[in-house]
């Protein structure tokens, strides 16, 4: 396995596979390839993978179904590819567990930058070489966030969060009582300029709430401050 990590590229367009093969290998990554979602799931059973680039439109099993199945028991970053560029298509991809979304046709250098960004965050928060940043747990009533192990439990039951979701939850938790704008959350978690990315933050907040809140319509932990952003309540 490459020292930089293993990428699983899932796409039925051979030209995209060939193109990204060149870029990824030049950057020192190991590349695994699949032409549909079912083949990708089979590969995941046999090989450790650090990140998945997953096309939406594919035969046999499309990217949406594959992403949902992957998220049942795996939390590595997933970047979705699609020829569709509408906001609702992007929101749909993020809602099922994807961490990022790139519209075809894309610049290979942009995709490479997004891959590197996702991998940095993944290894920072949940990878095997994660630094021991803080052994202490953040406890907010029945919600417990372990910074060093990337474990989140609610009423004693472990909650599976993606690296991006964990990063957002941690950011809010260490700033309890402070309202964080969507721009601030995006810049801190995505580590890139905001560029009108409100929908992206909103989708991730919704997914976190679905996992930690009993009543998502009246959330206990993550409060919306209308017109500004979000805050984690002090309980």
Image (cartoon, helix red, strand yellow):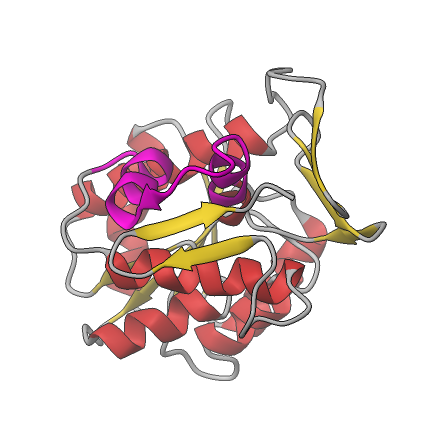
Spot the residue most to the bottom: 60
Measured along the vertical axis of the image, is residue 51 above or below residue 38?
A: above
Relative side of 86 to 126, left or right: left
147 or 18: which is nearer to us?
147
216 or 64: which is nearer to us?
216
The answer to which image quadrant residue 58 occupies is bottom left
Q: Which secondary structure class fits the magenta region best?
A: helix
Relative side of 60 to 21, left or right: right
Is the N terminus in the top left, top right, bottom left or bottom right quadrant?
Answer: top right
Relative side of 210 to 167, left or right: right
Percent x, y of residue 17: 32, 56
The answer to which image quadrant residue 31 occupies is top left
Q: Is residue 107 visible?
A: yes
Q: Is residue 178 magenta?
A: yes
Relative side of 18 to 153, left or right: left
172 or 223: which is nearer to us?
223
Is the C terminus in the top left, top right, bottom left or bottom right quadrant?
Answer: top right
Percent x, y of residue 230: 40, 51
Q: Which residues are magenta?
A: 167-192
Residue at image position (25%, 37%) is 113
Residue at image position (34%, 34%) is 188
10 or 65: which is nearer to us?
65
């Amino acid at each position: 396995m490459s020292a930089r990590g293993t990428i699983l590229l899932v796409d039925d367009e051979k030209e995209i596979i060939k193109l990204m093969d060149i870029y990824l290998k030049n950057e020192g990554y190991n590349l695994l390839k699949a032409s549909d979602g079912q083949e990708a799931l089979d590969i995941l059973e046999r090989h450790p993978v650090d990140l998945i680039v997953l096309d939406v439109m594919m035969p046999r099993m499309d990217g949406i179904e594959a992403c949902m199945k992957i998220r049942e028991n795996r939390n590595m970053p997933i970047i979705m590819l699609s020829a569709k560029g509408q906001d609702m298509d992007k929101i749909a991809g993020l809602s099922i567990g994807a961490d990022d979304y790139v519209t075809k046709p894309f610049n290979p250098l942009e995709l490479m930058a997004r891959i590197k960004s996702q991998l940095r965050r993944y290894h920072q928060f949940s990878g095997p070489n994660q630094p021991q940043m803080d052994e202490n747990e953040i406890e907010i009533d029945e919600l417990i966030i372990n910074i060093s192990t990337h474990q989140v439990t609610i009423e004693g039951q472990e909650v599976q969060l993606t690296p991006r979701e964990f990063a957002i939850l941690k950011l809010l938790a260490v700033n309890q009582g402070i309202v964080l704008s969507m721009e601030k959350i995006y810049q801190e978690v995505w580590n890139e300029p905001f560029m009108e990315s409100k929908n992206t933050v909103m989708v991730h907040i919704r997914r976190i709430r679905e996992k930690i809140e009993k009543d998502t319509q009246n959330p206990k932990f993550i409060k919306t401050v209308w017109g500004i952003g979000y805050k984690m309540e002090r309980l």
